[in-house]
Image (tube, helix red, strand yellow):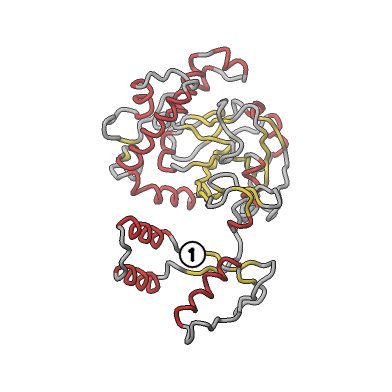
């Protein structure tokens, strides 16, 4: 509920596809997990680009943990991501994070992985200094053909032997080339990210401002105008097949659906909030007959200004299920399920609806 937040009002959940990259050989701290199957799990918004994976990025100084998934497999990610997973029913123990092993990112460098959809039989974990702990899982799958950040970081490792040596990365581990996967107008069949980096004079991952601009160019053009040139959906528009590829990966057990807040949300008690899978009652504002009546009412309404009408239309378009109850606090019990209390702001929404059918202007409906 927005009014329970001290920061992050209006922030909603963001859905990611968790790509499961299987660890081929359990070494170092991961050796104690044998004979379990261990996956590094990367959160991505672009599952359709997984055909172009060449490596996996980890933050060398980030803290990682291993946790047991619901099916008994072991996942490697940050503790923050594990907490979101625990409240979404993805872990063996619900609503708790029980780390098995804890380690720094540099302890996992050079790990051999098997990743779904890519043409590379083995990809390696490599260091990336810009990987963040407060977004995603701290594990980033690399698609240098369509991600300028990935391309710039890969070029850095190729051109800087001292950087490779610092983290125990061999030349063989970075001896990969970007895989063309999307045909993008303006760039043709050329590889988007390398082309944009060359056009903008980006020579390393230190060109931070230019990389932000390059990413916006490549991602927007690639998603809305790009066509896949690889895989079973070859020849189809990227935006048309994104969901189909996501479903294919999930069905094959190579990915999971995961959500976290779009931005940090802090509750009034000072806790960082998570996206939780809970039982909940909703007001279904998106119900087809109800929505049809609202749209008809709007068409008969004089809004006096076109912008006002557009705002109404935009709200009707996105407003679907809205939570209306909670399990604690003061308030009126939900008549058909009395273990729930009508959420205070929803209470305002509900009883105000009765004003339209009052028999006398001084009467009020009492819960």
Q: Is residue 121 visible?
A: yes
Quarter residue 138 falls in: top right
Residue 75 location (% of width, % of height): 63, 42
- In the image, is 306 to the left or to the right of 65? left
Q: Residue at x 58, y 34 (%)?
A: 132
Quarter occupied by residue 292: bottom left
Q: Which residue is mark 1?
A: 321
Query: Residue at the location (39% across, 30% down)?
Result: 179
Q: Quadrant of the N terminus?
A: bottom right
Question: Do we see residue 71 in this rendering?
Answer: no
Q: Position of residue 257 (x, y in %)?
A: 52, 51
Q: Pick whichever, 366 or 108, lies toward us.
A: 366
Looking at this view, is 250 or 4 the one in front? 4
Q: How many C-alpha atoms fall within 10 Å of the one at disc 1: few (<14), some, or many (≥20)?
A: few
Say which residue appears at 26% left-offset and 31% top-offset. Answer: 186
Position of 355 with respect to 334 (left or right) is: left
- Image height of 92 relative to 116, above or below: below
Q: Is residue 237 above or below residue 301?
A: above
How many numbered circles does the render carry? 1
Most foreground residue, 90 or 80: 80
Would you place residue 56 above or below residue 347 in this image? Answer: above
Quarter of the image for residue 200 reads top left
Quadrant of the snapshot with the C terminus: bottom right
Query: From the viewer's perspective, is 353 left or right of 278?
Result: left
Relative to 196, is 160 on the left or the right? right
SS for dot 1: strand
Residue 165: percent from the left, percent from the top? 60, 15
Please name whichever residue, 124 or 5, is drawn nearer the observer in this view of the structure: 5
Query: Residue 248 at what x, y percent from top left?
Result: 44, 50
């Amino acid at each position: 509920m927005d009014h329970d937040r001290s920061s992050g009002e209006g922030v909603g959940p963001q859905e990611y596809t968790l790509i499961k990259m299987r660890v081929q050989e359990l070494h170092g701290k991961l050796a104690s997990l044998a004979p379990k199957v261990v996956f590094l799990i990367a959160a991505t918004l672009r599952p359709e680009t997984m055909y172009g994976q060449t490596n996996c990025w980890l933050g060398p100084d980030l803290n990682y943990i291993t946790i047991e998934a619901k099916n008994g497999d072991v996942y490697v990610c940050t503790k923050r991501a594990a907490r979101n997973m625990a409240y979404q029913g993805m872990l063996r123990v619900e609503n708790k994070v029980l780390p098995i092993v804890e380690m720094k990112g540099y302890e996992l460098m050079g790990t051999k992985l098997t990743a779904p959809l890519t043409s590379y039989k083995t990809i390696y974990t490599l260091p990336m200094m810009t990987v963040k702990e407060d977004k995603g899982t701290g594990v980033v799958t690399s698609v240098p053909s369509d991600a300028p950040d990935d391309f710039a970081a890969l070029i850095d490792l190729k051109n800087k032997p001292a950087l490779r040596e610092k983290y125990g990365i061999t030349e063989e581990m970075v001896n990969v080339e970007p895989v063309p996967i999307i045909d993008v107008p303006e760039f043709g069949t050329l590889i988007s990210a390398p082309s944009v980096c060359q056009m903008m004079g980006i020579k390393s991952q230190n060109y931070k401002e230019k990389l932000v601009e390059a990413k916006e160019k490549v991602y927007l053009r690639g998603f809305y105008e790009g066509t896949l040139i690889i895989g079973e959906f070859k020849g189809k528009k990227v935006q048309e097949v994104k969901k189909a590829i996501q479903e294919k990966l999930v069905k094959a057990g190579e990915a999971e659906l995961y959500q976290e807040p779009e931005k940090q949300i802090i509750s009034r008690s000072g806790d960082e909030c998570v996206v939780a899978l809970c039982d909940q009652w909703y007001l279904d504002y998106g119900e087809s007959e109800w929505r049809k009546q609202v749209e008809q009412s709007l068409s008969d309404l004089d809004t006096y200004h076109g912008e006002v009408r557009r705002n109404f239309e935009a709200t009707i378009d996105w407003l679907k299920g809205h939570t209306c109850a909670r399990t604690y606090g003061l308030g009126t019990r939900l008549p058909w399920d009395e273990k729930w209390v009508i959420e205070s702001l929803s209470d305002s929404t509900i009883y105000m609806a009765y004003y339209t059918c009052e028999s006398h202007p001084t009467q009020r409906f009492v819960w």
